[in-house]
Amino acid sequence: MEIPCTIYLRKTIFFVAVSLSLALLTSCGKTSGQMADDATETVTTPTSPAGQAAASGQEQSPTGTRTAYVAPQATQSPLTLGVSNERVKSGEEVCLNVQVADFNNLLSMQYSIKWDPAVLQYVKTGNYQLEGIGPQNFGDNRTAAGLLTGLWIDNSLQGVTLPDGATIYQICFKAIGKAGQNTEVTLVDGPTPFEVINLKQEVVGLKPVAGRVTIQ
């Protein structure tokens, strides 16, 4: 899906002195898949002593060192993100629920979803139930290989809590395999790696629960 030439304001969480900052993402002619994949871009800073000094406004020190900030690990229960089990006839469309548990005071999450592309053909995501999530939150440029990337950020930056078992969206496929075939649909740690952040800007664990589609 082609996105018009528009400037998108993306609220991005940086772990720098435990502060939040806003970044502008210009997406002229990008696809929605490229936009979601951009969520995993790396922010770089000058690595040479001169570059570091210029960036900080300090005088250059020949013996200066850098210490990377490491986000603390949360003590709360990991987020459970699961996919429902479904049965479908060959040639028909099926939608799977993506459900959560221990979704407590979260600011953001990212992940990838994987399935067997010889059994299922990606169609769309839909039935969005989580505030701030929509088609723009998914990278669909690798679906032919059985991969979909996902990113969500709480636009209010106040943290979101959902009841256990809540469905946050659906992912829909067309069954292209033969009767008797099946495939897992599950979250995986790449190409977009797992990352869940809570209101305290701590890293929360992610527990994936696979679903399965069986063709009748």
Image: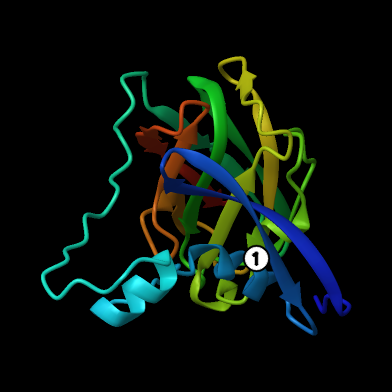
Q: Residue at 43%, 71% (x, y): give it.
A: 55
Q: Position of residue 160 (x, y in %)?
A: 64, 25
In front of the other: 28 or 94: 28
Residue extending farthest bottom: 29
Graded by Cα atoms within 10 Å as few (under 14), some (14 to 19) or many (20 or more), the crowding at tag 1 reads many
Residue extending farthest left: 63
Residue extending farthest top: 163
Using the rendered view, name the quadrant where residue 25 is placed.
bottom right
Quadrant including the N terminus: bottom right
Q: Amino acid at mark 1?
A: Tyr
Q: Position of residue 154 (x, y in %)?
A: 67, 37
Q: Against 69, is 41 above or below? A: below
Q: Is residue 168 visible?
A: yes
Q: Position of residue 168 (x, y in %)?
A: 67, 34
143 horizontally vs 17: left or right: right
Which residue is labeled 1 in the image?
122
Colouring rule applied to residues: rainbow
Q: Residue at 40%, 65% (x, y): give it.
A: 56
SS of the residue at dot 1? strand
In front of the other: 37 or 112: 37
Q: Against 101, is 186 above or below? A: below
Q: Position of residue 33 (x, y in %)?
A: 65, 71
163 horizontally vs 27: left or right: left
**Picture mark count:** 1
Using the rendered view, name the quadrant where residue 71 is placed.
top left
184 horizontally vs 216: left or right: left
Q: Is residue 174 visible?
A: no
126 horizontally vs 122: left or right: right
In front of the other: 149 or 122: 149
In front of the other: 92 or 79: 79
